[in-house]
Image (spheres, rainbow, N blue to C red):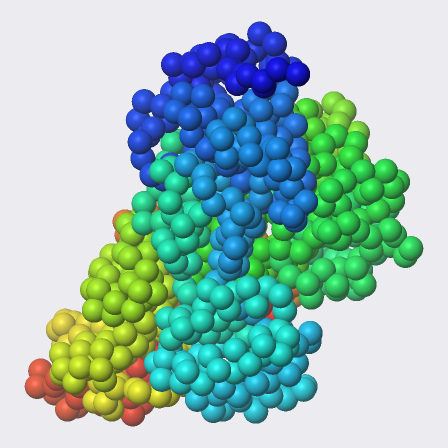
Amino acid sequence: MGFNRRQTDSVGVPSDPDQLYRLLARGNRGPDSVWGHQSKVMEHWHTQFHDKEDVALELPTGAGKTLVGGLIAEYLRRAEGSRVAYLCPTRQLAVQTARKLEDYGIPPSLLIGSWREWDQADLARYQAAGSVAVSTYSHVFNSRPKIDTADVLILDDAHAADGYVSKPWSLKVNRRSHEGAYKDLLAALSPALDPLLLPHLCSENPGTQYLTGIYLASPVAVAAHASHVESVVREAVAQNKVSDDAVHAWKFLETHVADCLAYVSHREILIRPLIAPTFQHNAFSSPKQRIYMSATLGAGGELERAFGRPRIHRIPVPSGWDKEGTGRRFFVFPEMTRDLASDRDAVAPFVRRVIEQAGRVVVLTPETRVADQFRERYLPENYHTFAAKEVEDDLTVFTSQPAAALVLTNRYDGVDLPDEDCRLVVLDGLPAKGDLQEKFLHDSVGAEEVLRERIRARIQQGAGRATRNIRDHAAVVVLGRSLTSYLARRDIQASMHPEIHAELEVGVDASLDQTSDGVWENLEIFNRQGSDWSEVDEDIVRNRETYDRQDGPGAAALQRAVRSEVAAANALWSKDHRFALTSIKSVTDQLRNAQTPRRYSSLWSYLGFCVAHRLGEATGEAQFQQAAESYFKEARRNSLGTTWFDRVAPVAAPSAAAVEELDPTDEVAMNSILAAKDLWEPEAFQAALATRAGLQQSEPDPYEDGLVHLGRLAGASKSYGDPRDGKAAKPDAVWIFDSARWVVWEAKNQAKNTGEIGADQARQAGGHRRTTEKAEGAVAPADSICVLASPKPKVHESAYNVAEENVYWVQPPRVLELFDTLTRAWQDARARDLRTMTVTALAAVFRAHQALPSQWLPTLRQHPLWRTPEE
């Protein structure tokens, strides 16, 4: 036998990825040519971003994303001799990708599963740049990465990668599976927790509030006790008292506990950095380029936070594909229907009926608890149920069953079920329940805006699991009050892809104020895909062409801030606290004028307090203690409307003088009252008091006039009503307290004091905030509220299901009581001569009458419409 001779690529070295495919297409099994939009994306990359370290490109499902990524990878391999690794979230997707690359004429090396079982010839070919490695994220983001010599990484489904990226730095201890380690670690963290919490966290049967709550251990106290915490974890690892994942995470976290955040719940403890320090992970940071591919990219810095990169250049969606999606979805909202909204027990039989009619169903849930509840409540008896691990290598075990459910937890990508494989998707619960950090940001901090892109991507990708080509169709059943009300919001619909936006509108209209029998009939029309549905489909297509996807409020500010966020996180990990504090200042400055991210900014301000305090303790320099006090006040001010700040252990708090300050809304109110010199005059003051009579009437004009004057008495810097110019529905009154808070009113005082508040009124009230934002040309402050004033004694269940967060219901007598409270405070202040009073003195008068905004706002917030009383 002779020597093996090196084989050269028969197509030669192309000038760009587009030409490469023209050469490959002569003998491959792929399409004859690339599509125009694919060509534009590759040209954009080749001419403008070829030398950038981090580049992201967006191509919706069905737009040929794999071919684009494969051609860029193969071009770099042939033209530059680069070792290229193409990473997928799951083994199943990696197998699909490798098959596609083979069809396109691109040689893959499939490297999945245990590295000990890899084909060594395939590995050698990749390492010699003779093929493109196709693997999973876990083989790069690992304590011992096996894909660690790549020159270029192609990261597919990048929008879903946050969990894979952060996993190596996330030490989780679960109470159920590792009770001993959980209790040991809870005891070690106890100095960093509010002492009032500890009995509830230690209890076997705490109340619902403590069973579901997520709490931040004080980073100052964690740092002070880091050596003890580390010794406890080290012992747990040595004695195999924790999971294998925790053992691997400990290799990254050892000596870095003081640089992490610790989150505690009754079920689990999580220790991790806020942003993964990928800059120290050579397998990810060493390649000369990382290309992130996604079906849905957005603004707000989500991608940068997920991967720990300060800047990722974006290639926009090609024209045309920014409107058109793949397949057709019909969204069904059982809990919006008239009969099922008020009878929760009847929802389950309806859903079971839908599942039985469909046969196969894929169910997507945010957490194990929701998945377990779904199996118990909604699945028909004796239904064959599959979990993710059972279909990892072969989906046919599910698709071959005539009646089966594939129930997945926190996994909204990686499962393709086209055509008759599956015609029904169930989304159960809002997908904002990843790890404890994500839950903390959403549930405790209320920083929805920083998670909006993540939530949006999961919903869009989850809804599309069974619509994988342009002619495909599937029904999508939406369950859970949080997800139902979220998708009913017009601003959320506007943030979706235009096609999903139009589909959601049709789905909401087809469920809201309809009966479940009517929804069932509509579902049958959709499943038949006949002429009756064609008319609805035409409406969707026509509407989608008029929509442009809208970024959420504050997205631009979050995008600007993310570079400093990454810098601060990396500096903390490197124990460079001075630079960390400088970067945190940049973060808070970027977010200071963006009113919506205020709650997220409060967390960064608190981290600034912690870092400044540590520097003050270490150096003895007074400037750092002063900075700590300033950050503490800022964190407290920006966390209004949340509970997390008060739940952090009161250790190393600044001086009492730094804590005792006027609430921002109170301060605005007092300044506005001192500036309202016209109301100091007897005639004007009495005229304002005379509008109280309007608040006792059912006629709209006098009532709204009374609300406007009530706003002036309350200290609003601006208080105005609806000019009634015949245009679309507007708020009946708006109280602006500068940038501290808005109170927006929808008055239904003309309604009878019988019956129930319906879904339409709740949705109308929720939309008033956005109407006011347009009128003001500004984003509403984070803790702004919308008040629906109605004499009706009850609220229909459907109103709770669609009401937006921060919508509250108040009955007219409460409004009159507020008017009288403010009147007494004004009379007392006027008797003391307003002209001589300071803000502090006036606040003392109003405080004595319970007339400060911080005192009367809770009265308006007693009945939230976005959650039922039993919640």
Name the one closer to the observer, 811 or 37.
Answer: 37
Quadrant where the C terminus is found in the figure? bottom right
Residue 772: x and y in percent read 35, 53
Identify the residue at the far left of this view.
836
Q: Is residue 128 left or right of residue 532?
A: left
Which image quadrant for residue 870? bottom right
Identify the residue at the far top of this view.
26
Q: Identify the residue shown where x is 37% and y is 71%.
A: 259
Q: Is residue 647 left or right of residue 622?
A: right
Residue 671: x and y in percent read 17, 75
Q: Is residue 826 visible?
A: no
Identify the residue at the far front of this view.
1
Q: Is residue 368 visible?
A: yes
Q: Identify the residue shown where x is 52% and y is 51%.
A: 145
Residue 328: x and y in percent read 65, 32
Which image quadrant for residue 752? bottom right
Name the one closer to the observer, 526 or 672.
Answer: 526
Residue 624: x and y in percent read 18, 78
Labels in figure, total: 0
Q: Is residue 158 left or right of residue 405?
A: left
Name the one closer to the observer, 286 or 687.
Answer: 286
Q: Identify the residue shown where x is 76% and y is 40%.
A: 394
Quadrant where the N terminus is found in the figure? top right
